[in-house]
Amino acid sequence: MIGTGYVGLVTGACLAENGNDVWCVDVDKKKIDLLNEGHVPIYEPGLEEIIARNVKENRLRFTDDLKEALDSSLFVFITVGTPPKDDGSADLSYVFNVAEQIGELMDGYKIVVAKSTIPVGTTRKIKEIIEKKLKARNREDIEFDVAFCPEFLKEGAAVEDCLRPDRIVIGTENDRTAEFLKELFAPFVMKDQRLFTMSIEAAEMTKYASNAMLATRISFMNELSRLCEKLGVDIDEVRVGMGTDSRIGTSFLYAGLGYGGSCFPKDLKALIHTGNQNGVELSILKAVEEVNKTQRLAFIEKIKGHFKGQLEGKTFALWGLSFKPRTDDMREAPALTIAKALLEGGAKIRAYDPAAINNAKVLLPDDGRVVFCDDFYEALEGADGLILATEWPQFRRPDWDRIKKLLGAGAPIFDGRNQYSPQKVRSLGFVYYGIGRP
Ligand SMILES: NC(=O)c1ccc[n+]([C@@H]2O[C@H](COP(=O)([O-])OP(=O)(O)OC[C@H]3O[C@@H](n4cnc5c(N)ncnc54)[C@H](O)[C@@H]3O)[C@@H](O)[C@H]2O)c1
């Protein structure tokens, strides 16, 4: 695994768990040292145990020496980041840099599998780069194959997704590679053999298409939630009514603060950019992005509206910082947009998150306006209102009497994830604001 981040570390650990010998490589020496000292640099349920087990049984190793890892590997996975550039396109410099190093260092047959999310045509470019480097070394005798296997894991459930994926997609240009990869991944899909081989380009597109569809469902529901609010209809009842249609399905239909994270926002931008480059306007996806942006702003307006625009001197308890529960990932987290807007308005924040506080600390001002609390009730002390930004399960059934004592009767509860019953919260004397609820 070249790139030991969310994808490389989880995939590496899960491949080791299935009996393979795995090297995880990273340029970040600190990360490698941490892992070699037995620490796991990211929060992901179940990951620590499988890393510990596989390290102990000598199937999983960490290094910053790419040559050492390459020499003893048949499969070389590229799992480095592909962050967005200013124009929305995917920054492929990390991927191409790895391809150059592979071409410079490899000494025998390798199957180079890209797993980072990359636009159609990128795997072919990886191949060209490696070929060029081998030519420059006069080592055109060294054979290699390339493939693209999109990664579908969800942060927060990454280990489970990786060990038991819905499907495995293998994009290759020849049968030899397809057979090798099928053999490697077969243990992950023992039960129903959901393993598909296709062209490299179709596999590259499959990843973007999947994320674009999921983001579309979220924005679709968020847009409808605005209309529901005006009509006095509860979007959550509508969700149940429509999602149980087997043609529609129940996933990704929750109205809320919109999507965030390291994937949906950047992958949508990259796909729109690819569309523009090819003269195809992806108007649905542009609307999906726009709804996602305005969804957060509308929520901030609700908070401001309650205080008649006067946030100066107010303090808010902010429950949940990560972009979704069960992860410490703060990339494009709605909580961040909300916190920044409140601070700009002159408010203070008392925040709590079960896993993301360390990551949030570097993203929010360090001047006393944001206090990070050890407990979610502590965050309520002296606050004028509660904002729920991430639906961690522990926030689901809070002690409302305790909340009332801390916040006082009549305080507003801004439920950004529709976690609480409006009737119940109102009956306790709070003012309730949800998303798309009467
Ligand atoms: N995070 C997810 O949930 C997820 C899911 C599916 C697909 N993806 C895709 O997978 C890719 C990786 O995402 P991530 O979230 O794991 O990223 P990440 O930022 O967590 O990890 C990337 C790692 O690569 C390392 N790196 C950079 N250049 C390197 C080099 N030359 N050699 C070795 N290591 C190098 C970085 O130090 C970092 O540790 C992205 O393309 C992303 O879109 C991510």
Image: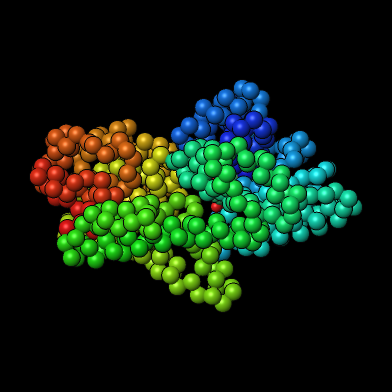
Q: Would you say residue 191 is visible in this rendering?
A: yes
- Quarter-of-image position of residue 52: top right
Which residue is most to the bottom? 279
Q: Is residue 342 left or right of residue 133?
A: left
Quadrant containing the N terminus in the rendered view: top right
Scheme of colours in the image: rainbow
Front residue (pair 70, 297): 70
Residue 186 screen position, x and y as percent? 62, 40
Q: How many marks?
A: 0
Q: Quadrant of residue 108?
A: top right
Q: Is residue 52 above or below residue 236?
A: above
Instruction: Establish if 284 lies above or below 42.
Output: below
| Quadrant for the C terminus in the image | bottom left
Q: Residue at x 33, y 45 (%)?
A: 390
Q: Seen in the image, is 127 located left or right of residue 138?
A: left
Front residue of 200 and 183: 183
Q: Residue at x 66, y 33 (%)?
A: 20
294 or 220, which lies in front? 220
Q: Is residue 244 above or below residue 273?
A: above
Query: Residue at position x 57%, y 68% from top?
Result: 274
